[in-house]
Amino acid sequence: MVTVNLWSGLRRFTDGELAIQVEAQTIGDMLDALVGKYPGLGPIFEDGISVAIDGDVMPADTSKSISPENEIFLLQQMKGG
Amino acid sequence: MSKVHVSTTVNGEAVEFLADTRDSLLDSLRDSLGLTGTKEGCGTGDCGACSVRVDGTLVCSCLMLGVEAQGKEIETIEGMASGDTLHPLQQKFIEHAALQCGFCTPGILVASKALLEKNPDPTEEEVRYWLAGNLCRCTGYDKIIRAVMDAAEEMRGAA
Amino acid sequence: MAKDTNTSDFRYIGSRPARPDGLDKVTGRARYGADIAAANMLHAAVLRSPHAHARIVKIDTSKVEALKGVKAIVTRADFPTGLTGEDWDLQENTMAGERALYDGHAVAAIAATSPHIARDAVKLIEVEYEILPHVIDVDDAMADGAPVIREGAANKTVPEGMHPNVVKYIEFGHGDVEDGFAKADLVMERHYKTEATHQGYIEPHACMAQLGADGKGEMWVCTQGHWYIRRMCAAVLGLDTAQLRVTASEIGGGFGGKTTIFMEPLALALSRKSGGRPVKLVMSRSEVLRATGPTASASMDVKIGMTKDGMLTAGVANFRMQGGAFPGSPVDMALYCAFAPYQVPALQHIGYDVLANRPKCAAYRAPGSPMGAFAVESLIDEMATELGLDPMQVRMKNGSKSGDQSSYGPKFGVIGLEETLAATQAHPNLSFPLGPNQGRGIAAGYWFNHGGETSVSVALSEDGTVQVSVGTPDIGGSRASMALMAAETLGIPYENVRVNIAETGSLGVNEPTHGSRATFASGKAMHGALTQAINEMCRRAAGKWKIDPEAVEWKDGAAVPAGPNAGQFPPMTIQEIARKMKNTGGPISGHHESVPDGVGDSFGAHVVDVEVDPETGHTKILRYLVVQDAGRAIHPSYVEGQYQGGAVQGIGWALNEEYVYDDMGRLQNPIFLDYRVPVASDLPMIDTVIVEVPNPGHPFGVRGVGETGITPPLPAIANAVAAATGVRIRHLPITPTKLLAAIKAK
């Protein structure tokens, strides 16, 4: 089980939960599992998100493996200039 | 409307071209003579990227007409080096990393050369005010000023 | 540790050789976007809306069609339909559909045999507009009764009941802010505003495009990212992506503004309509300011709690930003960065992305971060002053350290804020005596930096020199940094490496040179590609020596036995391997594709001394210091250049630059005379200190440096002006008129 931290604005789609545990081996599985649990998250994820794994911020790479030891945060998609 | 035949000297060479009466000197240099080193940044004489010398005077070529080149002596960035030998200003710009994107560089080099011909020992303030008509958005001007002052010192030493 | 000499660990990295493209750029030979011509070429011109918001009732091109020299006319009708999401936004911005959404919005385009004919022709197009009410200011655009720019553009994040112009909502934070404020000795809440500014690159957008009826096209364009341009043009025009080949010219500045398309599809569409002739399209300066992508304007409320000895206890930030008539203002990143330099036990961030009748914003150097820093750093400074505390000490007391939880959620990796603040405090500029009407301001700033899709290849030439193909255009000297890293990795001279910016047909997808990623991401991928090539070269040597490839290693430009047990063989140089490669297995190359992780954040601190003329309100910069963590400065001159350039853009933003609109919503200052960027006589030398806290995520410790530098100037200057005059300006820019009025009102 990995713990995924969401931003507080998503509370209304997750019955108030912000640290959600799901069963997943990859980022792709994790996102699918989150949407499976809280379908309201689907359109948010489709618009694009970034993921921070142990502080490393990156666009969501669905094949990337994750493990229970990782600190995982979801963030709005980041771009540079 | 027919074009005007213009005969002029550019970087010491006699050239001729046809100018639409609405072509700026900048347009003529770039499009009729293929000398694309001089750049257009604004078209209104505010950025200095189009700086050239006309009979020794530093001008914004976007503010002159191509037909006005008739009988004049024009110097552009392409004439600054002598064959393989760079002008000290060009050399110092490379050494001091006084360019990042390089777009303003031709105009600033032409303007700096004009300054040093007029005043071989300028103060930092004099260099800054002389170059106030040449915009640079990348460097913050610091390394440009250092390069010009260093080139001036080298040119005084060689004189 | 501050950098002052070559790091002795490296042979090439940290030195200051001439950049490879230096000769081309000081002689005028380098070719930028507009420095191209082709046989049979046409010239394009664009008709743009003079109205901020108007229904396009009718476009009549009949007078133009007959004009001699006009070879193609394009309107929205020439574009495919059915796009959605960001692609629809791009298409709608490229050419207006039912409505013109801002002053300068493209309505039609012409290609003709000369630029004069094209511009004359554009004036003959008759457009019937029905003018609609418009809205310019971000807070006005959210208010009841504001003109609706687009129904249904809000995404699912926006709560019920907000004005349709609010298209995105973000909320995040941690801790209990009410509890935090209760613990504070001083709580202050202030309102801040910043205006839209433009990246101000001196080179206007320019391209030459050619597109045939078979859907195959070519384009030459000045851009920070030619794969993005390719994908976007293909989407907007309904082309197959791989059939469009885009070459990046040299680029005369970008700063984020050239990471996206504005007029490029118009040139392609005109080319196809003219029967496949090449079409050159160069924007004028006023077109650039009116119709490319300035940054957002911001209206921000910040509330902070501080104890009497300067510890931050809580913070609330409510930011509203307009990014033009399309979603995309950087309000989220502004919020992520706003408190990032500090450890605050309780934080709440709320943000709104709002539409307005203004051009579609594009990224501008650390998008969002300068605005957020302006608000938070100004307030922290005001509170420190109120409590009689040293502003530098307050930063240091609350400063984020490696491994701390960031204000936006995840833990920081290895960061260098502490070292940066220490180096700032130790700098002699902080003890320079100040005279009357003079004041000193300091501020910190932050940018995450970025990895992104990267694809690099390298190849060995027959004589042992090496070519490197990257996809990140060279905006500020990155070819030099790539060549230094390659030289270091291979152990060959810097001059033996040629770095090329490859066109889209030669490499996999590359993200643009943005997000301060070129040296980091292209450099890291190049290291991977070189490692692959080195392994192959070792394998060739092993083959000749008849030993196991595992027993061969690479040292100082040659394959050598990995230890005395491997055998006694003299080093096989790269030249020797290259000379023989066609007989030992063929060409030797390497490639690497990734979305690299291990990005290193960059923190900076600036110190500025100003003098304000009490009679004119003019602010003069006396001294300016930039201290910033580069991780490892590959070519220190170009790192210094990024620090200085970012600082000066920030100075312009703080003191002069803003978009000025009239009551018809028309931009009043679309030329450089009136959109006043800093000039040489405005400034002193910009002092720099490169701090190096290496980033463990990069083979040489690199952190991106290009963006952080524009963030601290906005608050540092506001703080310096406050110190000089006792007046706090909370609405940028701090123009002489505004400052004088505030001084008089005091």
Image: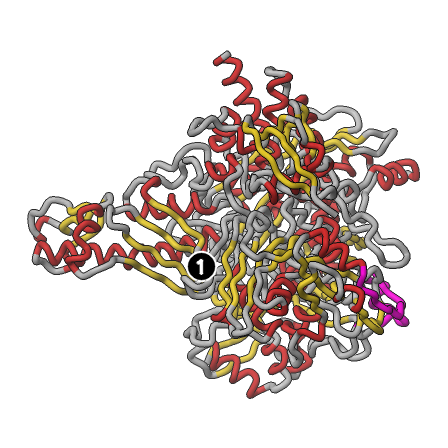
Let me know if residue C362 appears in the view. yes
Q: Position of residue B16 (x, y in %)?
A: 60, 35
Residue B62: image x %, image y %? 70, 39
In the depicted view, which residue is nearer to us: B16 or C191? B16
- Output the chain of dot 1: C
Residue C9 placement (x, y as % from top left)? 33, 40
Residues in magenta? C124-149
Front in this rendered view, residue C165 or B41: B41
Work out whether residue C318 can be spotted.
Answer: no
Q: Is residue C363 magenta?
A: no
Tell me residue C260's x, y (percent). Answer: 61, 61
Image point (57%, 22%), residue name: B149
Q: What is the three-letter code of the residue carrying label 1?
A: Gly
Relative side of C537 to C448, left or right: left
Give the residue pinned by disc 1: C598
**Which of the 4 image quarters holds residue C571?**
top left
At horizontal 37% and vertical 55% (from top left) the residue drawn is: C526
C132 within the magenta span: yes
Residue C491 falls in image quadrant:
top left
| Residue for point 80% across, 75% down | C164
Which quarter of the rendering shows the C terminus of chain C?
top right
Secondary element type, mark 1: loop
